[in-house]
Amino acid sequence: MITNTALNEIKDIMGYLDKTPYCVTRRSLYSAAELYDGFNINDEDSYGNCFDGKVYQYYQFTGCKDESVYESLARSLHDHGIHAALSEFFELHDPHCCVGIMGGHALLRTDAMYHDIALLSKRLTEHGFIMLSGGGPGAMEATHLGAWMAGRTLQELEEAIAVLKVAPTFRDKGWLSTAFNIINQYPQDKFVSLGIPTWHYGHEPSTPFATHIAKFFENSVREDNILTLAYGGLVYTPGSAGTIQEIFQEAVQNHYLSFGFASPMIFFGKQYWTHEMSIYPLLEQLTASGKYKNLLLTLTDDIDKIIDVLSQFSPQQQHE
């Protein structure tokens, strides 16, 4: 029998859950329109008035880590619903066609690598792949810009990047407005891409170029999903601490064949991955010594090579 004390506590919990600015019973992925509902494209400072901005403010106010038991429950329920929505997404889309691009959030829109990532993503999307990233700025934004511009000409992609260059980083005024300008200038509903951002890094706005957005509170859950869902392979572009963490986390999954097969690990940028950040030679050494097994490694500067490796990959062949 439920005591009056327990009943009152249940009422308190339900009252708390009802007042959060986010829906704890949500069972669908976000769209950019939902996240940025309330944002005025002519007023960059209006970000704080949109849904995403309000949730981030609330996240900071209630404690990024040391939240109350009620808030912890609310966030867990929300993230559980987003995880369920991801499962539904992959009931409609083949997870083996999902390719992730990893790279730095600080990559400038003016950087040549930003252009190369967008072009690679565009071409992979046109080849039938579903592009996945952490859903933020930098290399992540370039991934979804490329997917958004799939089916259009190279000139149109370059024109879009030229517009975006006026605000090179997410800290520059106009970063979000210019993205929405491109979306409005080049509307599309044919190609999908999946961004998986987090309010843990809420100071980095989610890219509106992603057509489907799985935004989590818990960053560890988010990180695991990014690497787990890229069944079709991962492309590593220049990055720092976060990207390196993702490299070795994925290497462990492939080593143990955690999902029954190993996916390609492609390193885009020979100079960077062999000299500036000599991760690739280390992985080769660890593989040769038997410390790592089942790693499908590629190092290249060639977009055509990346597309070829990913197109030829088949999980079924690993069991033949």
Image (cartoon, rainbow, N blue to C red):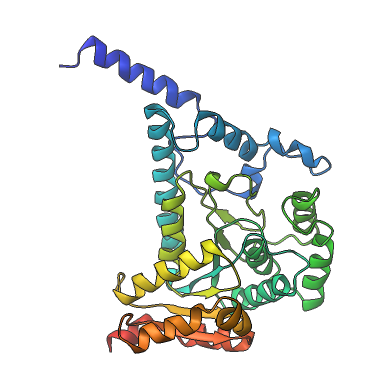
Estimate the x, y position of residue 211 in percent, counting from the top left. 61, 57
Q: Quadrant of the image for the C terminus?
A: bottom left
Q: Farthest top residue?
A: 4
Q: Is residue 128 left or right of residue 261?
A: right
Q: Quadrant of residue 116?
A: bottom right
Q: Farthest left residue?
A: 1
Q: Is residue 176 above or below residue 129?
A: above
Estimate the x, y position of residue 314 in percent, counting from the top left. 40, 83
Q: Quadrant of residue 292?
A: bottom left
Q: Nearer the viewer, residue 84 or 218?
A: 218
Q: How many marks?
A: 0
Estimate the x, y position of residue 103 in percent, counting from the top left. 59, 67
Residue 93 visible somewhere in the drawing: no
Q: Residue at coordinates 47% horizontally, 78% vertically from top-left?
A: 265
Estimate the x, y position of residue 152 in percent, counting from the top left. 74, 73
Q: Is residue 141 left or right of residue 172?
A: left
Residue 2 visible somewhere in the drawing: yes
Q: Is residue 263 above or below residue 225?
A: below
Q: Residue at coordinates 53% horizontally, 66% vertically from top-left?
A: 243
Q: Is residue 164 above or below residue 111?
A: above
Q: Is residue 59 left or right of residue 141?
A: left
Q: Is residue 297 left or right of residue 145?
A: left
Q: Residue at coordinates 66% horizontally, 53% vertically from top-left?
A: 208
Q: Quadrant of the image for the N terminus?
A: top left
